Amino acid sequence: MAPTFVRCEFPASRPGAEPGEIVPNVALVTLDRPEALNALNDALLSQLVEVLRRLDADPECRCIVLTGAGSRAFAAGADIREIIGETEASLRVEDRFARWDEIAAIRTPIVAAVRGFALGGGFEIALICDMIVAGDDAKFGQPEIRIGVIPGGGGTQRLTRAVGKARAMELTLTGRTFEAAEADRMGLLTRVVPAEETLGAALDLAATIAAGPPLAVLAACESVAAAHELPLSEGVAEERRNFHSLFGTHDQVEGMTAFLEKRAPRWTGR
């Protein structure tokens, strides 16, 4: 039997929680190769895509927290021993980076909870996530240039859109590692917290999102993501379509009625 490199807890529980105390509608997905700093081998990536797809299809799952086992790394990049023998032809035939695209296609919001190293492919997966909660011990970087290649999972594109050409160029061409405080100043992170509070803070954020109106949350995610992909006029048009689509839903009526009646809304995802 193949080893399991990805653990999934749904519904999730907070660190140190009492037995049976859960975070409703939130899944906790853990990259689990701590002895290899959660390096991304083929089996781990396949399992990660399978788990995320399953959660994405479950209407009870409204937010996902993605983290790495242990405190040393979220994911320290690709497993170099596994890819050193690849050729241009084999990479094209295997379409190895298709898994990054499959992760990016997950519609359920994903919060990355990052401690320790998030390097190379690990950094690229964090960039794909919708939000990043980082411990103050987190370290980020795209060190591929140091081993004679470049990022291949979208790193040059997503990093440039997040921090601008000049910073992205410097980080990609030098491959230097930078800490959470600098990543936060660049605007890469949702928040930085003390290291031991990282997972709890990510779960709290996910719980707040999961408690919101599911259809509006998805529409908001799609609209914000469009800002990275589309010119302004097309992005605004996408936002407007999403806005219009929410009218006539049960949650839109419920939310506005609850506001007028000064009570808490009861979301159903319809």
Image: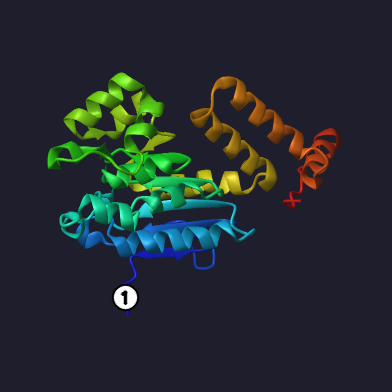
- Whether 196 is drawn above or below 4: the answer is above
Going 41% across and 46% down the picture, which residue do you hit? Answer: 112
In percent of width and height, residue 238 lies at 64, 31
The correct choice, above or below, for 209 with respect to 225 in the image is below
In the figure, 195 relative to 52: above or below?
above
User: Foreground: 96 or 256?
Assistant: 96
Q: Colour scheme of this structure image?
A: rainbow
Between 238 and 3, the one lying in front of the other is 238
Could you say which is closer to the camera, residue 262 or residue 96? 96
**Visible in this render: residue 38?**
no
Q: Percent position (x, y) of residue 198?
A: 38, 45
| Whether residue 241 is visible | yes
Q: Say which residue appears at 44% left-offset and 43% top-offset.
A: 129
Report the side of 236 relative to 99 (left or right). Answer: right
Up/down of 108 relative to 193, above or below: below
Residue pictured at 36% horizontal, 27% vertical: 160
User: 10 Å neighbourhood of mark 1: few (<14), some, or many (≥20)?
Assistant: few
* Quarter of the figure with the N terminus: bottom left
**Amino acid type, label 1:** Ala
Residue positioned most to the bottom: 1
Q: Residue 265 at x, y = what percent? A: 76, 44
- Identify the residue at the far front of this view: 89
* Residue identified by numbered label 1: 2
Q: Say whether residue 184 is left or right of residue 137.
A: right
User: Based on the displayed image, in which of its 4 quarters is residue 142 positioned?
Assistant: top left
Q: Position of residue 79 (x, y in %)?
A: 22, 56
Q: Secondary structure at mark 1?
A: loop
